[in-house]
Amino acid sequence: MIPIIASPYRILITLTTLIQAFVVFVLVAPVPSNQVRGFIVNTLNHIWNESTTLRNVLLILNALNVIELYLELRFLFVLAPPRPPVDAPHHHRAEFFDMQIQLFAAERNTYLAAFSLFIYLIMRRLLDLQQQHVRAREGQKAALKGRQPQAQEESPVVIAEPVADFSPATKKNK
């Protein structure tokens, strides 16, 4: 049996991916109020904006993930040898099984690298969207507090003019 030893790089990528997945879970989890959401988002944004080391480490890890993803996909689709025939001698079958192990490892590494890149992009986009949401809610509340209840101002919402209907059913009726 071949001993399975995880490299420190794989362990680091796996832990980073799990932490990023936890951050994504925290960002999409339902919260009881906008104040709680604001606290979570502002805390995560503060950590992200103040820690250049964190940003640089994740940038380097993602660059390594892109390189690894390219190399593993290249191995899977270009360099992988064809399957031996059924009536091949036994020593060819042993080589085939060794190659199968390498292919499974390359496939695992491909999934890990792709998921790590994907979850990083999702985390960054969710953090930006949640920050925009919190700012919009704060602006909306500030506008409501600043508005006088006695003075009835005109609504800032502009209603669009109806668009002409060009469907075939309306053309026949005309």
Image (cartoon, rainbow, N blue to C red):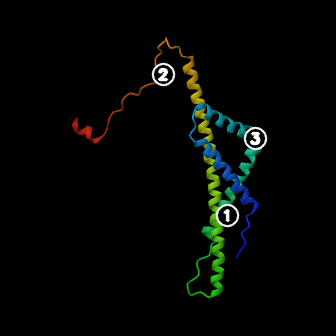
Q: Judge the density around disc 2: few (<14), some (14-19), many (≥20) Cα neighbours within 10 Å.
A: few
- Does residue 30 appear left or right of residue 3 in this picture? left
Q: Position of residue 89 (x, y in %)?
A: 62, 88
Residue at the image position 64 percent from the left and 48 percent from the top: 22
Identified at 38% across, 27% down, the residue is 161
Question: Residue 44 appears at what percent x and percent y?
Answer: 68, 39
Q: 54 and 77: which one is in front? A: 54
Give the residue pinned by disc 2. 156
Q: Indicate the amino acid at tag 1.
A: Leu
> In the rendered view, would you say 118 is above or below 94?
above
Gap between marks 2 and 3 measured at Cα: 40 Å
Upstream in sequence: badge 1 or badge 2: 1
Image mark count: 3
* View extreme (front): residue: 32
- Which quarter of the rendered picture does the C terminus lie within? top left
CA gap between label 1 and label 3 equals 31 Å
In the rendered image, the vertical position of residue 112 relative to residue 131, given as above or below: below
SS class, disc 3: loop
Question: SS of the residue at dot 1?
Answer: helix
Mark 1 is surrounded, within 10 Å at the Cα level, by few (under 14), some (14 to 19) or many (20 or more) other residues, namely: some
Name the residue that disc number 3 marks: 51
Sequence-first tag of 2 and 3: 3
Report x, y in % for residue 81.
62, 75
